[in-house]
Image (cartoon, rainbow, N blue to C red):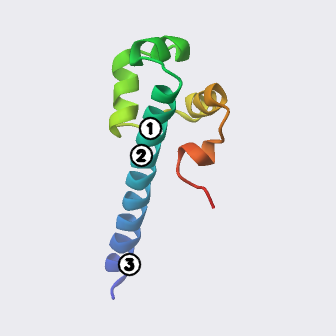
Amino acid sequence: MSSNDKVMTFNIKIIMEVYSKMINFAKAIKQLREGKGLTQESFAKELGITTRQLQRYESGEQLPSLVKLVEIADQFNVSTDFLLGRNG
């Protein structure tokens, strides 16, 4: 395997890991929000973001900043690891 192939394989692994975290986060935040009986609009307002931004989080289009991730974890009293699917 050439060094270019190794780099490409490594990059694909990183992309897949990031995608997996985005999907885990999307599912977790939506389940937690709905479990708390919050609408997207009301939860977005609590977080100080737009409803569209929350929709991007919940659809897996985008991950929040580190600061916002911690804020979301605090809102639900869970760890950032839980939100990202790192449960053990």
Residue type marked 2: Met
Distance CA(mark 3)–CA(mark 1) = 27 Å
Residue, disc 3 = 6
Q: Position of residue 45 (x, y in %)?
A: 49, 11
The relative height of residue 85 versus residue 2 in the rendered view (above or below) is above
Q: Are marks 1 and 2 in contact (CB under 8 Å)?
A: yes
Find disc 1 in the rendering and name its residue. Answer: 63
Residue 65 at x, y percent in the picture: 52, 33
The Cα–Cα distance between marks 2 and 3, rounded to whole angstroms, is: 24 Å
x, y percentage for residue 62? 38, 37
Please determine whether, in this image, residue 35 is positioned above or below residue 43. below
Q: Where does label 2 land, which residue?
A: 22
User: Dot 1 lies on which element?
Assistant: loop
The answer to whether 68 appears left or right of 10 in the picture is right
Q: Amino acid at mark 1?
A: Leu
Secondary structure found at label 2? helix
Question: Label 3's element?
Answer: helix
